Amino acid sequence: MHGDYIIPLATHEAADAQRVGPKAANLAALAQAGLPTPGGFCLDAEAYRQQIRHAELETAARGTFSTEDGPQARRYALQMKLGLMEKPMAPEVLEPLLAAWRSLREQTAAPCVVRSSALVEDRFGSSFAGQFESFLGLEDETEFLTAVRACWTALWSTRALRYMATHDLDPADTAMALLVQPLVQARCAGGALSQTVDGELLINATWGLGSAIAQGEVAPDRYVLDRDGALKESQVGIQQRHDPSCAHSSRPRIGSSRSAPTPCLDRTQIAELGGLVRDTEKLMNMPVEIEWALDGAGFKLLQARPLHLKDAPVPDEHWRRYPRLNGQPAGVGWGTGRACVVTCECELSRVAPGDVLVTRMAGPALGQILPRVAGVVAELGGSTSHLASLARERGIPMVLGVHDATHRIPEGSNVAVDGVAGVVRWMAQQR
């Protein structure tokens, strides 16, 4: 009723990844199997293509990766971003989109969420975790349409273009679909891995919205279950947030008054969520990584993507004599290198090929340096953060939630990172 570009998540058409992207299609498959999701609708990728045509941006789109002239390529990318944000929206897209949004708002009386669902993301080998955009709590038409445009534009962001280049993808050959959903008023939220390299099920959780975990801003709760659903390990996280923009910000700041060491989930809730994760794995017929939220009505599944797994490595025995710190493993690899201690993103240029990056916050912006590091250690973040997903994809060992790592691990020391066991060791630099 809202036009061909609008696809309700509950319909079979929403499970077509070629129209709505794997992220939305996976969520639609969960909903149609009876698993709990927030509902909502998809904006077909063809709406993005129509907007490209309407704004006369085809030449710029094709030129970004087709030219070897670096400055010209950057001008084309900038033209794409400005055009998608500023040029009038095609009426055949705008009218049904607004009609669908108004209907959703009337049905739910809740603020909305707009999430990217690019045709190239959430695939095995190219998750694009944290590379695109999501916007939460949208309540009026102006901010809703701005979020739609910003999600389209994210396909042409610098970090997304870098990621596509490393995966031999051309943005002109793909498109951006969108998910529009009611905001889950989450009491707590997080992520989960249906399998670890040890065959266990892992759940991360934090108070409030799960974006703090995805962005690597907190060290979340960690719950480990065996394959039969029995709880094997329960570790309460450090619910802190850190501002990465300033090198002189001293320590992470407490995120809220609910940051006390109280578990986000009780045993019954952990068991229920573990069952939903196993159901998702069975439905997708592969190991999966999910995002979830818990509100007053129960659990909601927000996302499911393929999970990269690799066998546990055999660490070098001589490292066992050196000091160690424990954290949350990203799940792959064993690596060694020189420690480069970085306290804000402005210092990333100091990270040399083969270094082990030691930092405070493990946000998606660090994805740009993954190709050149031997490992990553961070004080915040958890096993289900976006950066951990990118590290698993590349086979980079990473340990997150390592308390006081930037103060304990000396600059220039030799560091060993066990991304499977979640252990970091170091020895003084030889002189």
Image: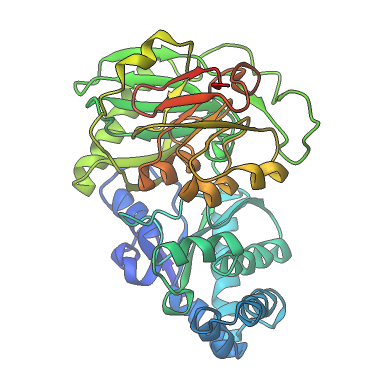
Residue drawn at x 69%, y 33% is 343
Look at the picture and state if 220 lies above or below 354: above
Residue drawn at x 30%, y 43% is 308
Q: Position of residue 45 (x, y in %)?
A: 44, 73
Q: How many marks?
A: 0
Look at the picture and state if 232 lies above or below 8: above
- In the picture, which quadrant includes the N terminus? bottom left
Residue drawn at x 60%, y 69% is 153
Q: Position of residue 160 (x, y in %)?
A: 53, 62
- In the picture, which quadrant includes the C terminus? top right
Residue nearest the observer in this picture, 36 or 258: 258
Look at the picture and state if 199 lies above or below 119: above
State whether residue 426 appears in this view: yes
> In the current view of this chain or complex, which residue is farthest to the front?
431
* Quadrant in the picture for residue 121: bottom left
Residue drawn at x 51%, y 60% is 116
> In the current view of this chain or complex, which residue is farthest to the right?
248
Q: Position of residue 253 (x, y in %)?
A: 73, 24
Residue nearest the observer in this picture, 411 or 329: 411
* Quadrant in the picture for residue 366: top right
State whether residue 295 appears in this view: no
* Quadrant in the picture for residue 312: top left
Its colouring scheme is rainbow
Q: Is residue 216 left or right of residue 293?
A: right
Q: Position of residue 138 (x, y in %)?
A: 66, 54
